[in-house]
Image (tube, rainbow, N blue to C red):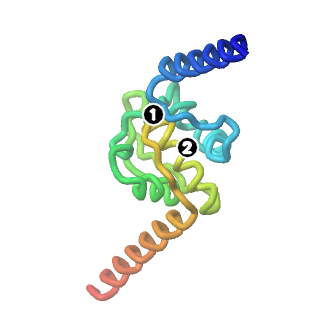
Amino acid sequence: MIRNTALFLGLVAMAVLLWSVSGDAVPEPPNSRGAAVYQEYCYRCHGMNGEGGEGRFPIRDKAVWTLGVDTVISTIAFGARGDVRANAHGVRKGMPPAPYNDADIAEVTMYVMRVIAKRPSTVTPADVARVKQRHIEALRTRLGAVGQSK
């Protein structure tokens, strides 16, 4: 009994030590669907933890992480565009929309919020559908305004 208790306390102490050494990241199961989507689609451009790297685009210190989760969902679902500095040349680059369903977008959003932004977040497929619908409605409104101004 005493041996089992000592073993248990030792394991708890090791877990606490490992958690404190690993930084502020919120633990994410390595076999989660969010991690798998990130590995399949995001890793090649953004690196393992958003650090970028040679020929990659760092996202770790971007302002998007300080904004609401809806902005992150929108960026993943619809992509991003803008000027990027690469090798001292101004290059017009873009991030294509993720070719995944709402459930996978929700999972990868939670993953990047936990691993890169270090902000625990819960995102559901319904959240993704809501953000997509709001985006589409905004586009329709803008297109309608353009059509009316002619």
Residue 99 in the figure: left or right of residue 68: right
Q: Residues within 10 Å of mark 1 (few under 14, many from 20)?
A: some
Tell me the element at label 2: helix
Residue 60 at x, y percent in the picture: 43, 34
Q: Compared with residue 147, is residue 138 higher up or lower down, i.e. above or below?
A: above
Q: In the image, what residue occupies the spot 41% across and 41% down?
A: 91
**Residue lying at 40% horizontally and 56% vertically, measured from the top left:** 71
Seen from this angle, which residue lies furthest left? 149
Of 130 and 139, the residue lying toward us: 130
Q: In front: mark 1 or mark 2? A: 2
Residue placed most toward the observer, 6 or 100: 6
- The residue pinned by badge 2 equals 111
Residue at 37% x, 46% y is 64
Asked if the residue under mark 2 is in contact with the one under mark 1, i.e. CB atoms within 8 Å, the reply is: no
Q: Which mark is residue 132?
A: none
Quadrant of the rendering where the C terminus is positioned = bottom left
Q: Residue at x 67, y 47 (%)?
A: 33
Asked if residue 116 is positioned above or below residue 145 in the image, the reply reads above
**Which amino acid type is marked by label 1?**
Pro
Neighbourhood count class around disc 2 (C-alpha, 10 Å): few under 14, some 14–19, many 20 upward: many
- The residue to which callout 1 is attached is 58
Lower sequence index among marks 1 and 2: 1
Q: Is residue 92 toward the left or the right of residue 35 in the image?
A: left
- Residue 101 in which image quadrant: bottom right
Q: From the viewer's perspective, is residue 83 above or below residue 22?
A: below
Number of marks present in the image shown: 2
